[in-house]
Amino acid sequence: MGKEKLATYFRQIKEKHDHLFVPYIVAGDGEGGVNNLPERINFLQESGAAAIELGIPFSDPVADGPTVQAGGLRALENGTTLHKVLNVLEPKKATRDIPIVLMTYMNPIFAFGIEEFATTCARVGVDGIIIPDVPMEEEDLIATTLKRYSIAFIRLAALTSTPERLKEIAKRSEGFLYAVSVTGTTGTRASHEDRVGAYLEDLKQMCDVPVLAGFGVSNANQAHALSKHCDGVIVGSKIVDLFHQGKENEVRHLIRSSISNKTSLA
């Protein structure tokens, strides 16, 4: 479980395909609310995802762009809570192969209780945690607790960080390093800055875990372009939007066309 499961599953995926693809979905968004999660997780696994980043809806999502914020509001209207998400994950733990990574903010974790949160995540099969509003200087609030349960605390690297800071973040990285490839919040972009390639390659040299580029990735061409410099991509806003529009076939096509230059998955 946890760090080991992420490492093992990523290795298995990379043996089949060239690149890793991690879709982000908002837990509880869509018809059925949290009850549709097991079905959606199975669909994404069968489509070739390397892990699933599961966003916990929150009332003040500072890192989220308009599309993800809208998905969060729909999930909150469906009555989605952190407790409900964790409860619905537990029954399928024994038969679920794909790693699950939660993306949440620190406030819901405080409300849950840090120790109880980590214990529950371990019990229901959560393998990694992303917390965008916890800077490196304050991560001891939760990093030590997650480590006791072998849950990967996934750090984020930013284009605007100094080389010294990036080296320290890379050194601490567990599971994978989330390399933010734009400045600003999540959302689709027409292109990425020229310096992103060098930034990703530098992180690869610093890191002992896979480096995945996220923010602003919305099509297979962008995924391939970024994956030339790192291990793969994380796609959020485009996935959230396609699911909201009922375009599951386009979700599948996006994943399958992004992960390999040479393997047909049709």
Image (cartoon, rainbow, N blue to C red):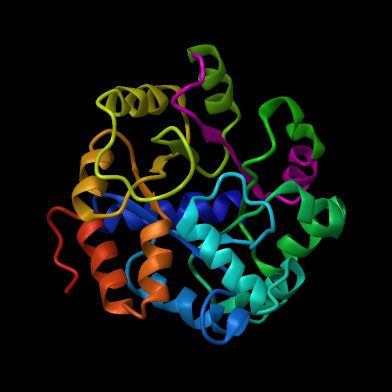
Work out which quarter of the rendered image holds the C terminus and state it.
Answer: bottom left
Q: In this rendering, would 262 be left or right of 79?
A: left
Question: Observer-nearest residue: 206 or 70?
Answer: 70
Q: Toward which corner of the image does residue 192 lie, by quadrant? A: top left
Q: Write the start and end of the magenta stretch as one range.
A: 142-162
Residue at 33 percent of width and 66 percent of height: 48
Q: Is residue 260 above or below residue 180?
A: below
x and y percentages locating residue 168 in the rendered image:
58, 20
Q: Check the picture and name the quadrant holding the N terminus.
A: bottom right
Q: Quadrant of residue 244?
A: bottom left
Q: In the image, residue 148 lies at what x, y percent?
A: 78, 46
- The answer to whether residue 252 is above or below residue 148 is below
Q: Is residue 52 visible?
A: no
Q: Nearer the viewer, residue 191 or 89?
A: 191
Can you see residue 262? yes
Q: Eyeballing the image, is 256 above or below 258? A: below
Q: Out of 151 and 241, give the one closest to the viewer.
A: 241
Q: Residue at x 67, y 50 (%)?
A: 151
Q: Which residue is depicted at the point 78% across and 33% down?
A: 140
Q: Residue at x 47, y 22 (%)?
A: 160
Q: Is residue 218 rendered to the left or right of residue 153?
A: left
Horizontal side of 145 relative to 132 (left or right) equals: right
Say whether residue 93 is magenta.
Answer: no
- Foreground: 241 or 48? 241
Could you say where residue 125 lies in the image, as x and y percent from the top left?
A: 65, 66
